[in-house]
Image (spheres, coloured by chain):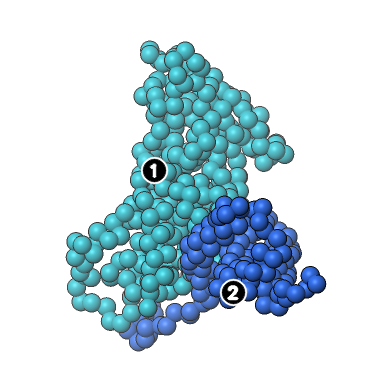
Chain colours: A blue, B cyan
Amino acid sequence: MAIALDAPRSTRRKPSRRSNFELQAWLFMRISGLALIVLVLGHLFIMNILDGGVHRINFAFVAGRWSSPFWQFWDLSMLWLAQLHGGNGLRTVINDYARKDATRFWLKMVLYVSMVLIISLGTFVIFTFNPNISN
Amino acid sequence: MTAVAENPTTSASGSRGELPPAPEGSIAVTVKLHRFNPEVDSEPRWESFDIHALPTDRVLNLLHTIKWYVDGTLTFRRSCAHGVCGSDAMRINGVNRLACKVLVKDLLASKGKHTTITIEPIKGLPVNKDLLVNMDPFLDAFKAVKPFLITYGNEPTQERIQSAADRERFDDTTKCILCACCTTSCPVFWTEGTYFGPAAIVNAHRFIFDSRDEGAEERLDILNDVDGVWRCRTTFNCTDACPRGIQVTKAIQEVKRALLFRR
């Protein structure tokens, strides 16, 4: 009968550290969610309620706001956080509910492509916005 | 005894003969069963049985009455019949319960109305026959989290000592009887069978927080995966379903926290 000797001899095995992506995605959802409460509610308040609300919004209003780096940063972070937050939410929904691997793959591809498109287009507009374009 | 019908395709009578007379104080109830016989049916079907039950009867008694005296082909698991072994988990009126722990008096319709008790197999596992499901996917997830003591180095000469406080840390999750009530009540498990499920995480928790165990890192790595704890949506179905009263969702959250704050 074989005597098991490997237990005392084996050193403490370093566990194979796998990807931390799911943990980081989970954490990101919590943090971005908190940030978005402030960003989105603030945005809605300024755009829809503060003096005159939605009726005063025109090209000049937007141009005026985006001349300030503060509002540029506000809108940029709102765009990125909302896209990544919503995109990751949809990713988990697809992971949970897609039944076939092919369906899951293609739904996620559509999601990722649309995220990249919207984020890059929005970022491009915020950074290259030209207030004189209307003339 | 585990009664098996001699002729499962044609038998319409019970395995123990005719239905005995209704006992005194019994009430007429309808038991609506979700049935499936792979040798005959192409699709699962509903079948209703009108029987008499005492308010103090357990749902398992109703199933016995049907199997023994009405239709011997009815198939379900049960072993100890006292809520210890965890083999008779089923969906009773839409919620996962052990048939041996639910009393008829708790399922009675309000005054004057006829009582119908609906019984289905637990959801998310392949149905073999009637209420009997294939537990393999469930048990595979359980095995995957290494639910055994892992230690390194020399064996101690005496038993492994543990303080009462250290034992208390994981006391709740030692109660699991692997009945699968929690895992098969989880909506994530219903749609995505690769998710480890609450029961596997509970049993991982039992060792992760055991001061004598040294395999916590390995188990945490396993549960950090795509199909691990981050799949949990905290719907609390598992906590509601557990017949042992384990705070399942809390245990899952504790594993998440351990993952979040490990070095």
Q: Chain letter for mark 1, please.
A: B
Type of amino acid under label 1:
Pro
Q: Position of residue B64 (x, y in %)?
A: 47, 29
Q: Quadrant of the N terminus of chain B?
A: top left
Mark 1, other Cα within 10 Å: few <14 / some 14–19 / many ≥20: many
The kind of secondary structure element at disc 1 is loop
Q: Determine whether B111 is above or below B173 in the image.
A: above
User: Residue at horizontal 23%, vertical 70%?
Assistant: B160
| Residue B243, disc | 1
Q: Quadrant of the C terminus of chain B?
A: bottom left
Q: Position of residue B99 (x, y in %)?
A: 44, 36
Asked if one can make out residue A124 in the rendered structure from this viewpoint, the answer is no
Q: Foreground: B172 or A31?
A: A31
- The reply to whether dot 1 and dot 2 touch (C-beta < 8 Å) is no
Type of amino acid under label 2:
Ser
Asked if one can make out residue B261 in the rendered structure from this viewpoint, the answer is yes
Q: Position of residue A121 (x, y in %)?
A: 72, 72
User: In which quadrant of the rendered view does residue A105 lie?
Assistant: bottom right
Say which residue label 2 marks.
Answer: A68
Q: Are discs 1 and 2 both within one chain?
A: no
Q: Is residue A121 left or right of residue B152?
A: right
The kind of secondary structure element at disc 2 is loop
Q: Chain letter for mark 2, please.
A: A
Mark 2, other Cα within 10 Å: few <14 / some 14–19 / many ≥20: few
C-alpha separation, residue under disc 1 versus residue under disc 2 = 60 Å
Q: Determine whether B115 is above or below A35 in the image.
A: above
User: Residue at horizontal 40%, vertical 27%?
Assistant: B106
